[in-house]
Image (spheres, coloured by chain):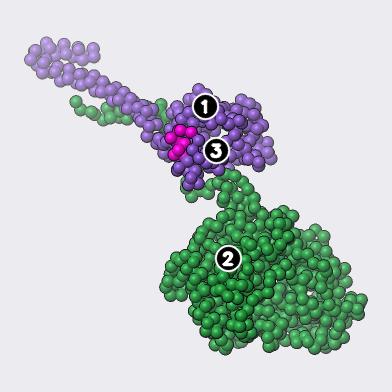
Chain colours: A green, B purple
């Protein structure tokens, strides 16, 4: 028997017929289509019990109330907390993306001890007992050698119980070197202290303002409490409030304002005094306020009239005389005007002169502690712990001069001057720092002249990072004691940035700790207990939780229930408004803070800009946020700098071309983005990129602006007053 | 054939031997043709039968893997001892969402310690309750994530009985074998036990057509809230 071709065909046809009338092809088709919809990488919303936890966002100084949506024990979404005094249901991009930080691959999963060379990423997992023993051993050695003052700490903020505990540890141990990152709010505080003669924070009654004069403040770019500012800005739009934005670049804020006044960078304070000149000259200031509630007006008036005439000011600032005149009239004649300053998001302190000039403008219209004006808000004072117990060693240590020079000598009024520290360490000007604790900060990335900062911190033999993430600072530390993420821990965090009422927010655990982390509050208490003697005696609490509850006393229940407390006080402090007196060393002058570098080698000026889409502080931008960054800012790994088409033409550069950008601090490769909204002669670069140690979604993308600029010491306050740096562009 | 016979007769007059010589290949050819035709039919039938066996019997056997539930659960014992019927354990949460298979937390309310003599209960307490580990139940009725289904409008608004979709599972004394589709990962219950897709009861199948059938029969508005028009996104994400 031979099976021929026809048989074979027939067999096939039979098989086909059979298969067709069987469910196989139809069922298979259906199954395959379902299979294609369920590939394992397709994100699937989890099912389970839905619950909500009210907490407070700790990702920026804005401190918004958040409502975290959970499915079973997983966080799936963060929303703004409705009716919260800071953000009333609103949330920003970074806050929204917070879940990606909780579940980030960058989380440090247990205490780690450096195993290889510094910064090489070799770690040894250790237990919490060993980690704390390591710290106490080091601290004990230094203390016994009488070197307790060589221990320093850097904290992202000085407000709240956690920074206070760290400060307390240093005080009880014997070091004066508790340092914080400074911002425009330090300058506001100094200005209020100098010119209103009282201690307090700057708050603004923006809701009632009817004219807003902003000297470069990024109202919708993250200045102050960002969501609060968005909402204020929306209200101004509805009420037709005029917002004048004065800055050299068409930022989002400038684009959304009623009027944008381009001004030569660094001359904002001069323009403020030019406006003051017109107000004084035309006698349109608030006479009642000046006569009854101020001192030193005549001296100051003479000084302003002598120096800040419209010709001078117009020449220096590049703003037309007629415009200065019009702004002065509009500002002085508005019912409830307010003037604000602090560039961009306000993460750099800036020049005290600028703040005093702008505060004086507010003084001229008498809007201090008035509806729609500037409010002096007392610092929240709910922390009333028993006095720190110091033994002789501690008293001797804290008696030493601070490494940053703040609080003594020519900077007696300033609290923190961290920006001076790298230079002091690198030049061996004072004593060496032998141990450093870093809390809620990432100085290796955020410090100006980051290369010099790294060099300085690398000289410190024992750097301890409390960060929850393997960020630049953790990467270069000697010991990482990972804190719970902000969505896993209790902490009181304060919203003070420009708010009329300070709000004490409570961060609450939304989910259980995901890894073997420990609350830094508990770590500090345990270190103190194990150090023994007066240090242990200064910490009468069993745990951070009990410390926190005790701190709030009868207010705790309310705070825990609502997630926030509005700081209550009897009245807003106010002294006589001091336009000038002998104590004020920082008299305004025409001398502006000059950018570093000579104009022959560096004919251009590079300025930074802040964006809501790029977190530029200690927290690296989460992937959700980075996805929103435009192609004209970051494309793959290349950063774009903005340049006016006229300037670009003179360098023979066109859109998208590569160029070498050099400043006195460093040289990087960038791409060109032509932008009509930037003044000729300037270059602008976004802050927040160029992380060298973050997750794979951010590392190596773009350039860190801080690498290209150095701090410029403000002669009056010592803070970093740099607003830009001279630069050079060369075609590649 | 007639023509061939004529030809044969013509040739036969010339001589027998020749005739034999001449005719034998003719006869061979004819037989071969008949035989081949037979083979072709046989081949067709073989192909048909084999493929029918493959399609109807082997394929369903290969398509599904058989899995046992981690614990052999007795619904009847439970329904007899609770007050609210199915909703005692399969309840609606305060926000209206459906709890589905209860979490360990609920089981522990009664089973913190072994209650009866059933060895399955002992395993349950030892393996899961004492370790605080959730039972990895295999869910017969699990739909793909792209299907949006809410129990509330069906049970609360339309007052449907659990049995309509889930059958008499509440009366079962043992957990059935879970047949997992090797391609999709879902239970055989969705397509239905019958591989051809025929059903006798409303709970036999839970494919889209089955949702649709009931919706059409009951004149359910299947339009979207916004447009009142029917559309994929009314039920699919």
Q: Residue at point 74% right, 55% down? A: A83
Asked if the residues shown at circle 1 and circle 2 are in contact, with their CB atoms under 8 angstroms apart, the answer is no
Badge 3 and badge 2 both on one subunit: no
Badge 1 and badge 2 both on one subunit: no
Residue A167 or A36: which is nearer the viewer? A167
Res. A47 mark:
none
Q: Which residue is mark 3?
A: B110
Q: Residue at point 48% right, 45% down? A: B130
Q: Which residues are magenta?
A: B116-124
Q: Nearer the viewer, mark 1 or mark 2?
A: 2
Q: Nearer the viewer, mark 3 or mark 2?
A: 3
Q: Residue at point 68% right, 76% down? A: A349
- Occupied quadrant, residue B94: top right
A312 above or below A572? below
Q: Residue at point 53% right, 49% down? A: A43
Percent coordinates x, y for residue A339 in the rendering: 79, 72
B37 above or below A631? above
């Amino acid at each position: 028997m031979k099976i021929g071709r026809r048989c074979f065909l027939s067999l096939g046809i039979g098989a086909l017929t059979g298969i067709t009338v069987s469910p196989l092809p139809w069922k298979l088709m259906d199954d395959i289509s379902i299979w294609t919809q369920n590939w394992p990488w397709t994100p699937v919303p989890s099912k389970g019990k839905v619950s909500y936890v009210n907490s407070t966002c700790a990702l920026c100084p804005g401190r918004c109330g958040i409502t975290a949506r959970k499915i079973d024990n997983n966080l799936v979404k963060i929303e703004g907390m409705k009716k919260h005094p800071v953000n009333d249901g609103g949330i920003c991009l970074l806050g929204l993306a917070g879940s990606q930080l909780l579940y980030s691959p960058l989380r440090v999963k247990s205490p780690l001890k450096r195993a290889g060379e510094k910064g090489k990423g070799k770690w040894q997992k250790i237990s919490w007992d060993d980690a704390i023993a390591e710290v106490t051993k080091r601290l004990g050695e230094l203390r016994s050698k009488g070197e307790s003052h060589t221990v320093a700490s850097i904290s992202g903020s000085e407000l709240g119980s956690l920074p206070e505990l760290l400060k307390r540890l240093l005080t009880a141990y014997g070091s004066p070197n508790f340092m914080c990152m400074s911002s425009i709010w330090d300058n506001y505080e100094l200005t209020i202290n100098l010119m209103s003669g009282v201690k307090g924070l700057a708050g603004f009654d923006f809701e009632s303002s009817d004219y807003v004069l902003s000297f470069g403040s990024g109202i919708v770019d993250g200045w102050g409490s960002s969501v609060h500012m968005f909402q204020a800005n929306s209200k101004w739009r509805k009420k037709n409030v005029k917002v004048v934005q004065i800055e050299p670049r068409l930022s989002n804020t400038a684009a959304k304002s009623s009027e944008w006044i381009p001004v030569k960078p660094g001359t904002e304070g001069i323009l403020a005094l030019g406006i003051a000149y017109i107000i004084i000259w035309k006698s349109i200031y608030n006479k009642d306020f000046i006569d009854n509630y101020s001192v030193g007006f005549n001296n100051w008036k003479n000084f302003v009239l002598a120096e800040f005439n419209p010709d001078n000011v117009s020449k220096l600032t590049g703003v037309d005389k007629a415009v200065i005149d019009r702004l002065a009239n509009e500002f002085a004649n508005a019912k409830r005007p307010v003037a604000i300053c602090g560039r961009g998001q306000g993460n750099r302190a800036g020049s005290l002169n600028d703040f005093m000039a702008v505060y004086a403008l507010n003084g001229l219209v008498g809007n201090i502690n008035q509806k729609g004006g500037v409010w002096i808000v007392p610092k929240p004072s709910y922390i009333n712990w028993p006095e720190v117990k110091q033994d002789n060693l501690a008293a001797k240590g804290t008696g030493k001069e601070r490494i940053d020079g703040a609080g003594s000598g020519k900077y007696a009024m300033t609290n923190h001057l961290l920006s001076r520290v790298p230079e002091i360490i690198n030049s061996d000007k004072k004593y060496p720092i032998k141990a450093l604790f870093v809390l809620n900060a990432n100085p290796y990335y955020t410090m100006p002249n980051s290369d010099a900062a790294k060099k300085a911190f690398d000289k410190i033999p024992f750097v301890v990072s409390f960060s929850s993430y393997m960020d630049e600072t953790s990467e270069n530390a000697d010991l990482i004691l990972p804190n719970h993420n902000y969505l896993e821990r209790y902490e009181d965090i304060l919203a003070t940035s420009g708010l009329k009422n300070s709000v004490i927010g409570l961060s609450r655990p939304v989910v259980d700790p995901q890894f073997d982390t420990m609350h830094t509050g508990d770590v500090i208490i345990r270190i103190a207990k194990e150090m023994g003697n007066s240090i242990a005696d200064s910490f009468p609490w069993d745990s951070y939780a009990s410390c926190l509850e005790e701190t709030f006393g009868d207010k705790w229940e309310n705070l825990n229930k609502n997630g926030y407390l509005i700081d209550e006080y009897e009245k807003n402090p106010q002294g006589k408004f001091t336009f000038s007196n002998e104590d004020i060393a920082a008299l305004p002058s025409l001398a502006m803070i000059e950018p570093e570098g000579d104009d022959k080698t560096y004919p251009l000026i590079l300025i930074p800009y802040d964006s809501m889409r790029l977190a530029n502080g200690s927290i690296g931008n989460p992937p959700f946020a980075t996805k929103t960054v435009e192609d004209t800012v970051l494309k793959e790994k290349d950063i774009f700098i903005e340049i006016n088409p006229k300037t670009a033409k003179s360098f023979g550069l066109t859109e998208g071309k590569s160029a070498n950008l050099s400043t006195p601090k460093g040289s990087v490769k960038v791409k060109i983005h032509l932008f009509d909204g930037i003044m000729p002669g300037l270059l602008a670069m976004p802050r927040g990129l160029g992380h060298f140690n973050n997750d794979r979604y951010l590392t190596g993308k773009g350039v860190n602006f801080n690498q290209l600029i150095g701090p410029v010491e403000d002669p009056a306050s010592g803070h970093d007053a740099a607003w830009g740096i001279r630069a050079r562009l060369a075609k590649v | 054939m007639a023509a061939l016979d004529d030809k044969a007769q013509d040739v036969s007059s010339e001589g027998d031997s020749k005739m034999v010589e001449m005719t034998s290949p003719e006869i061979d050819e004819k037989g071969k043709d008949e035989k081949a035709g037979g083979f072709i039919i046989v081949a067709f039938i073989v192909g048909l039968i084999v493929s029918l066996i493959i399609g109807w019997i082997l394929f369903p056997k290969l398509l599904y893997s058989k899995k046992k539930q981690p614990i052999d659960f007795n619904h009847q014992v439970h329904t007899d001892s609770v007050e609210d019927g199915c909703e005692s354990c399969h309840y609606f949460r305060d926000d209206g969402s459906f709890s589905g298979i209860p979490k360990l937390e609920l089981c522990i309310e009664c089973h913190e310690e072994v209650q009866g003599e059933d060895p399955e209960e002992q395993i349950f307490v030892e393996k899961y309750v004492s370790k605080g580990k959730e039972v990895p139940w295999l869910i017969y009725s699990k739909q793909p994530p792209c299907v949006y289904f809410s129990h509330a409008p069906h049970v609360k608004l339309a007052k449907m009985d659990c049995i309509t979709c889930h059958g008499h599972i509440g009366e079962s004394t043992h957990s059935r074998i879970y047949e997992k589709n090797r391609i999709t990962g879902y239970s055989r219950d969705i397509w239905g036990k019958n591989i051809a897709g025929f059903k006798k009861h409303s709970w036999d199948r839970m494919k889209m057509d089955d949702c649709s059938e009931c919706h059409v029969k009951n004149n359910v508005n299947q339009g979207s809230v916004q447009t009142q028009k029917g559309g994929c996104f009314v039920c699919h994400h």
